[in-house]
Image: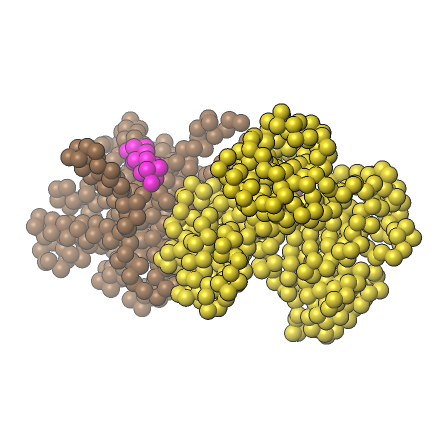
Chain colours: A yellow, B brown
């Protein structure tokens, strides 16, 4: 696929890396030659230096025969104009833009064929906010991702001693919780993936990924670890866009405090928020944290735009007794460094943005992609089309489907119904199939599996 | 630190792949039954297993290439490809009797220099003549570019290799997003132009065999001919004209050809300041030399003066090196102008050699900026090419290149004089080899056959340095390159 990425910032660069490694023809446009040079040295891509929305620059980048335009520059307006230019002059089929400002997003009418020709707008702040609120909703979860409009969720949990299922074989899960159907999609033991079978024994410290209907998730988590108490007290560090959105999302059912360094911004925040307490000060100030009872805080979440500040303040909060600390980290190298050790959960904003975009690049009818475990694994939701003769999946029992190695089917969503996968489940046309892929390199094979072949017999 | 297993793996792949280029000459030998079969079969039997073995013992090493490893592979490969390419030349009975001679001929081929140490080409087996031409053709667009086009498994590593080989100051301009596609596009243009050239030569009266060989060496800006009298052997106006056109095509940037074909417009050429400068250089030189020839009485007819003047100018300035007249006896400054023109009359991204037009253009504008600065001390002046400002980094690199080029030129000149050459022969020999042009003046006007082995080895080094645009090879020779 020929893809043009506008903007070589963090999202643009991560995206370029993901897409180029999947053998797409990627061209990156940015006005900063330094950023482009760094990318060019590392990846097999073409770069064009210039203003991303100018027709000439887009033409140079090969917009005339591009299949997709992804506008992720810093500036919302540039992204929107670039999509319009690409649509009007080059008839680019798919146009995706990152739009941060709520002022635009609020107006649904803006985005459409007659107005701004943008097929999909992504707002990284919103994605991250949703992601963090889901994590707070399920204490104990490391990663929570939605499928089928939130009807099904895949959750990653670290198993601990004390969980009733720890030390038991997987098949006993049904006797433990009779009314609940779930499927374990993958287990990571000391960083290595295991494809679970009925007789696999869950050990403490395993990272377990399971799929279940939304309502059943707390019960399954409770099987794997002593259920944490629900989150009541949240302390947020950083009152930027994400901090504000998070505070708004959480203030109704938790007691939320928000630390912001800049007094003017703090005043603005306090005007926007209802019950949340806005504190002016430095999130890495020990005295401020102690004064605000950090030791009885359930979740401390650092969401400033500075990786180092986030990491250090989260570490400090952990040391001072916060039950669980999370930190927003842009640099992937840092994520590996601190997650699981000094910090409980590292949240990588590019990862969620890239996940949201990847679904558009995939072949076959893939509606949702989630990058898991820092991009090494992937969970995808694909729609099965065709009939027994044209598709490799429809009309077959799961045990008959030839899945690539390291791939498991978690569940199937048929209309409104969630069917947890068992070996004798039969896939029907138009089913949404949710798969876990341990090695991202296999994604291509999975896509192929779901493509309808006309000549396939 | 360099990962040698990785270097070895890719190196093995390259050797085995290029040993297969010995197959076409085998076909030629079989077809003409010219007795030249054995050297190629022996060469193939020697090099193919060698390459496979090299690759096999390191096949498990897989990691992306770094720029440094790319440099090393490119340099080593040019050396080894020449060493291996020389094998059939030295094995053959009526060929090159010493390994030095064979190596000189092979390096001269692979670097598209076209200087020869062989006299009596007319009586050589056809398979050998074809082999020489083929060496140049492969070296023309670049052995590494070919490898990148054919071996997709090089991946990002392919890009590092490509950058170490491609001539010109701005190496990051890709035609297509992926390097493999870019390399393929370049070769497609190269091969189709060669095809056109073959047909043109053939229609103009060459035998099909001569047409193929000469088209190969024309498009490569190489200059190997099948006859001692070079292209003058044919003594045909039509062939001269065809050669002029295709030499000009070969020494212009292939990206332009690709874009012009791709977008179907000739505007690409007129919009490119390097191309405009390149054509103007050639025109000015052609007019100057033809005028000189007529005024000095070398040719009594104006048409002859234009014909021989223009041909010699285009051939030498584009670093091809065919001759149709003995320009070394021409009057006044003409021989020296011709010899020196090869330094700055080929475009970046072409098959020609020398400093490249774009560098000359940049240097001239850079120099002009310094002059303007004296007039307007506080002015902020940017050097532009094609309406776009060139970064200071590129300018510094160009200035550095020029300095190193001049220094090396002088150094080689002194060394050759120390080895006993007279100053004119020595300066011509350096220009002929460092610019990958071929023929020189004085004792090396037609061939390097009479030179001392030491001179030949110095020239081999100069040819390799010239083809890899100095820095790639010099980097590998510095201690810093090998330090951890």
Q: Return the x and y of residue B67 as percentages of the image width and height.
A: 49, 39
Q: Is residue A312 left or right of residue B403?
A: right
Above or below, A317 relative to A232: above
Q: Is residue B464 magenta?
A: no
Residue drawn at (69%, 61%) of the image: A148
Residue farthest to the top? A287
Residue drawn at (41%, 50%) of the image: A48
Q: Nearer the viewer, residue A140 or A383?
A: A140
For the question of whether residue B313 can be seen, the reply is: no
Q: Is residue A153 left or right of residue B355?
A: right
Above or below, B140 relative to A237: below
Q: Nearer the viewer, residue A309 or A54?
A: A309
Count of numbered circles in the view: 0
Residue drawn at (34%, 48%) of the image: B348
Q: Return the x and y of residue B320 as percentages of the image width and height.
A: 30, 50
Above or below, B439 relative to B211: above
Residue farthest to the right? A175
Q: Return the x and y of residue A398 as percentages of the image width and height.
A: 80, 63
Range drawn in magenta: B391-406
For the question of whether residue A106 can be seen, the reply is: yes
Q: Where does the C terminus of chain A fall, quadrant-wise?
A: bottom right
Q: Is residue B404 magenta?
A: yes
Q: Is residue B376 left or right of residue A53?
A: left
Q: Where on the picture, by quarter, is residue A301? A: top right
> Magenta part mainly helix, strand or loop?
helix
Q: Where on the picture, by quarter, is residue A213? A: bottom right
Q: Return the x and y of residue A395 as percentages of the image width and height.
A: 77, 71
Residue drawn at (64%, 65%) of the image: A365
């Amino acid at each position: 696929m020929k893809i043009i990425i506008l903007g070589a910032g963090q999202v643009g660069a991560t995206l370029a890396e993901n897409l180029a490694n999947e053998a797409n023809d990627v061209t990156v446009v940015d006005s900063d030659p330094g950023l482009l040079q760094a990318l060019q040295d590392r990846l097999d891509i073409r770069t064009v230096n210039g203003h991303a929305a100018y027709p000439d620059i887009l033409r140079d980048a090969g917009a005339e025969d591009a299949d997709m335009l992804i506008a992720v520059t810093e500036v919302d307006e540039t992204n929107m104009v670039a999509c319009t230019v690409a649509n009007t002059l080059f008839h680019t089929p798919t146009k995706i833009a990152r739009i941060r400002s709520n002022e635009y997003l609020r107006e649904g009418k803006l985005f459409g064929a007659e107005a701004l020709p943008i097929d999909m707008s992504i707002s990284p702040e919103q994605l991250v906010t949703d992601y963090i609120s889901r994590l707070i909703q399920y204490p104990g979860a490391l990663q929570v991702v939605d499928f089928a409009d939130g009807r099904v969720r895949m959750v990653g949990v670290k198993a601990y001693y004390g969980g009733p299922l720890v030390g038991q074989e997987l098949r006993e899960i049904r006797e433990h919780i009779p009314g609940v159907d779930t499927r374990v999609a993958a287990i990571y033991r000391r960083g290595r993936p295991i494809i679970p079978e009925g007789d696999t024994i869950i050990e403490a410290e395993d990272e377990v990924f399971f799929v279940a209907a939304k309502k059943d998730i707390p019960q399954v988590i409770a099987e794997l670890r002593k259920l944490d108490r629900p989150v009541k007290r949240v302390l947020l560090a950083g009152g930027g866009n994400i901090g504000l959105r998070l505070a708004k999302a959480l203030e109704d059912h938790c007691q939320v405090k928000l630390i912001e360094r800049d007094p003017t911004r703090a005043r603005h925040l306090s005007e926007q928020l209802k019950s949340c307490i806005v504190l002016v000060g430095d999130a890495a100030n020990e005295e401020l944290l102690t004064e605000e009872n950090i030791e009885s805080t359930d979740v401390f979440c650092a969401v400033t735009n500075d990786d180092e500040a986030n990491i250090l303040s989260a570490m400090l909060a952990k040391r001072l007794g916060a039950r669980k600390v999370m930190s927003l980290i842009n640099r992937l190298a840092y994520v590996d460094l601190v997650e699981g050790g000094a910090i409980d959960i590292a949240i990588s904003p590019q990862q969620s943005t890239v996940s949201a975009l990847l679904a558009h690049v995939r072949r076959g009818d893939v509606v949702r992609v989630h990058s898991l475990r820092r991009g090494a694994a992937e969970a995808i939701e694909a729609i099965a089309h065709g009939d027994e003769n044209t598709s490799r999946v429809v009309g077959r029992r799961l045990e008959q489907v030839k899945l690539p190695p390291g791939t498991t089917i978690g569940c199937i969503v048929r209309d409104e119904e969630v069917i947890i996968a068992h070996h004798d489940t039969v896939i029907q046309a138009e089913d949404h199939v949710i798969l876990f892929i341990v090695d991202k390199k296999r994604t291509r094979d999975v896509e192929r599996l779901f493509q309808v072949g006309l000549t396939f017999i | 630190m360099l990962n040698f297993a990785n270097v070895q793996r890719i190196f093995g792949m390259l050797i085995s792949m290029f040993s297969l280029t010995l197959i076409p000459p085998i076909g030629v030998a079989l077809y003409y039954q010219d007795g030249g079969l054995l050297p190629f079969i022996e060469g193939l039997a020697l090099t193919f297993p060698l390459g496979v073995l090299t690759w096999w013992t390191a096949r498990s090493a897989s990691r992306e290439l770094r720029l440094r490893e790319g440099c090393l592979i490119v340099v080593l490969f040019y050396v080894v490809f020449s060493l291996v390419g020389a094998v059939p030349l030295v094995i053959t009975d009526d060929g090159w009797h010493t390994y030095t001679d064979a190596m000189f001929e092979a390096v001269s081929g692979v670097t598209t220099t076209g200087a020869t140490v062989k006299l009596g080409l007319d009586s050589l087996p056809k398979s050998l003549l074809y082999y020489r031409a083929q060496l140049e053709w492969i070296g023309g667009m670049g052995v590494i570019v070919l490898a990148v086009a054919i071996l997709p498994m090089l991946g990002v590593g392919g890009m590092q290799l490509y950058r170490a080989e491609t001539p010109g100051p701005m190496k990051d301009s890709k035609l297509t997003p992926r390097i493999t596609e870019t390399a393929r596009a370049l070769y497609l243009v190269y091969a189709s132009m060669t095809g056109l050239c073959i047909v043109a030569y053939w229609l103009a009266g060459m035998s099909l065999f001569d047409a193929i060989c000469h088209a190969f060496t024309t498009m490569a800006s190489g200059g190997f001919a099948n006859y001692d009298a070079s292209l003058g052997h044919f003594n045909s106006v039509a062939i001269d004209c065809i050669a002029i056109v295709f030499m000009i095509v070969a020494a212009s940037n292939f990206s332009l050809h690709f874009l012009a074909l791709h977008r179907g417009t000739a505007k690409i050429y007129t919009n490119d300041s390097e191309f405009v400068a390149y054509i103007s250089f050639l025109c000015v030189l052609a007019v100057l030399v033809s005028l000189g020839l007529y005024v000095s009485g070398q040719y009594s007819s104006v048409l002859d003066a234009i014909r021989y003047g223009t041909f010699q100018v285009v051939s030498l300035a584009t670093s091809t090196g065919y001759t149709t007249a003995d320009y070394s006896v021409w009057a006044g400054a003409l021989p020296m102008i011709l010899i020196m023109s090869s330094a700055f009359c080929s475009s970046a991204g072409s098959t020609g050699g020398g400093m490249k037009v774009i560098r000359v253009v940049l240097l001239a504008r850079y120099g002009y900026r310094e002059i303007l600065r004296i007039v307007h001390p506080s002015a902020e002046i940017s050097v532009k090419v094609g309406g776009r400002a060139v970064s200071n980094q590129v300018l510094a690199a160009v200035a550095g290149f020029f300095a190193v080029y001049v220094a090396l030129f002088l150094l080689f000149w002194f060394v050759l004089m120390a080895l006993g050459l007279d100053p004119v022969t020595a300066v011509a020999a350096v220009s002929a080899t460092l610019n990958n042009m071929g023929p020189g003046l004085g004792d090396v006007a037609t061939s390097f056959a009479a030179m001392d082995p030491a001179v030949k080895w110095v020239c081999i080094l100069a040819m390799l340095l010239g083809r890899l645009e100095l820095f790639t090879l010099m980097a590998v020779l510095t201690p810093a390159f090998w330090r951890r």
